[in-house]
Amino acid sequence: MNSVARTAALVAGAVAMLVAPLAAMKALRDPDDPRLSVGAAPAATLVPGDVRDATGRMIAGAVWTGLMSYDPRTGSPVPAAAESVTSGDRKVWTVRLRPGGRFHDGTPVTARSFTDAWTAVVREGWHGARTISETAGLKGLKVTDDRTFEVTLDRPLNGFPALLGDPAFLPMPESVLRSRDWAAYGRRPIGNGPYRITSHGRETVLERPNARTIVVKSIPKPSDQYSAVELNRLDVATAVPSDRHETMDTEFRDRHLTLPGRAMTYLAFPSWEDRFTPAIRQTLSMAIDRSAITEGPLGHQATPANSLVPPGVLPGRREGQCRLCIHDPRAATAALTDAGGLNGTLNLWHEASDAAWVEAVAEQLRKTLTIDVQPRRVTAAELRTALDERKVDGPFVVHTTTPYPAPVAALRPLLEAGTGYEGEDVSDLITQAESAPTPDAGVTPARLAESALLRDMAAIPLWSAHDHFVWSERLHKITTDPFTGLNLTTLKPKN
């Protein structure tokens, strides 16, 4: 290639690089396109029992109708595909389906559409398997007739109906349950909900009779989503970049929303390390400036904790229960002196994804308490092994996601985090909360368990991830809830 040709090629390439982002932004939506568009990170999968991210849950909420859904105002479970979910002892549950349910291929939704789907989730080891086997404690399934089946759990659980809103419990049609061609099903899922998927790739097209078509576009970067809504090339952004958090209110006024989360991050303690007394654990909690971390390394994507229960768990949650979560360096320094100090190095065990904020917390502890703090990065497998072998010698990071809207559902995972914690009466209180006659009756023992856990500071609550949404002028206010995310079925244009 001669020099003139090379120069022309370079110029053409440079022009293409400049034009490509503009063309991509323009292609997001023609101003006259009647379809409603949503930007989101790509879903890992749309096989319902394997859904594991916010985009998957959002799409699943439109394409499938589960046994239960959630009231966005109260967070309480509401019957959907189920006509009733009843039990006399909270251990054996009878599920009765509404009549007339059908999948998008025209086949009926039966009791086996649910029971065989749950069996497949556990057999295939999908993401929802743990929810079915461990959180629910599923022990047995028995189909009584086409609309009725019986579920036996390994323990009484009054929150079981609320748990049935999770994608792990969605139904699948007989054809895919028989063929087990999960890859093909993931490319073009067949659900039983109000919307059906007509195309799935870089964009997922959802259609519904007598309603606007919805297009979920794969836009991984929050900044690209945000800019696209600003330019009216996109109707909803499901993420907001950290550098636009402070200007979001002025740029979108009443067209933005922060959704409280149901995921929490904690620092837990190994019970076999005697030096971490309750007084030392309380001291460490007061020395951590949570706001500095959420506004710094976490980029405004999390809310500082003031309770062991995340803010997205509405029924029964109490604000401000963790008084020792308030940053108070003077009190922390005095408390450390009163406790006799902390000997040796404080190792903070964590995975690679937590490195940035763990380093920041380590520096806060060094500066405030003048102690030696060292982050210790390990893999998830290495941490599990070290916990099993009781080799963890310092606080370790724990992430939990509350599986259903009840305070006890947020507390149970803290007993199963590998700490070896056996606080007085806490386990019994959590069992009482789960086995109470009703979820409301279980709130009091759950609150008592939370108070005991906070008194011992068995796990330091740090922060809860939250979601941000902004939307275009042509939409009414959007509807969300912490367990489904953005409700696609309620998206409507103003005219």
Image (tube, helix red, strand yellow):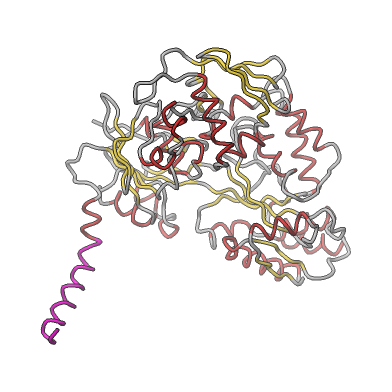
Q: Nearer the viewer, residue 428 or 197?
A: 197
Q: Nearer the viewer, residue 198 or 60?
A: 198
Q: Is residue 122 above or below residue 399?
A: above
Left/right of residue 25 with respect to residue 54 in the rendered view = left
Q: Which residue is drawn at the image coordinates 37% and 34% (left, top)?
A: 488
Q: Looking at the image, is 33 positioned above or below residue 324?
A: above
**Image location (x, y in percent) of residue 461:** 68, 50
Q: Quadrant of residue 362?
A: bottom right
Q: Residue at x 33, y 56 (%)?
A: 224
Q: Which region is colored magenta? A: 1-21
Q: Which residue is most to the front?
A: 179
Residue situated in front as seen by the camera: 439 or 68: 68
Looking at the picture, how far across and down is residue 322, in whole percent? Answer: 71, 46
Report the quarter where the C terminus lies: top left
- Name the dominant secondary structure of the magenta segment: helix
Is the residue 119 above or below the residue 309 in the image? above
Magenta-span inclusion, residue 334: no
Measured from the top left, where is residue 471 in percent x and y? 34, 43
State the residue at coordinates (40%, 46%).
Answer: 238
Residue lying at the far bottom in this picture: please name it: 3
Occupied quadrant, residue 380: bottom right
At a point 29% along the width and 31% down the height, the residue shown is: 207
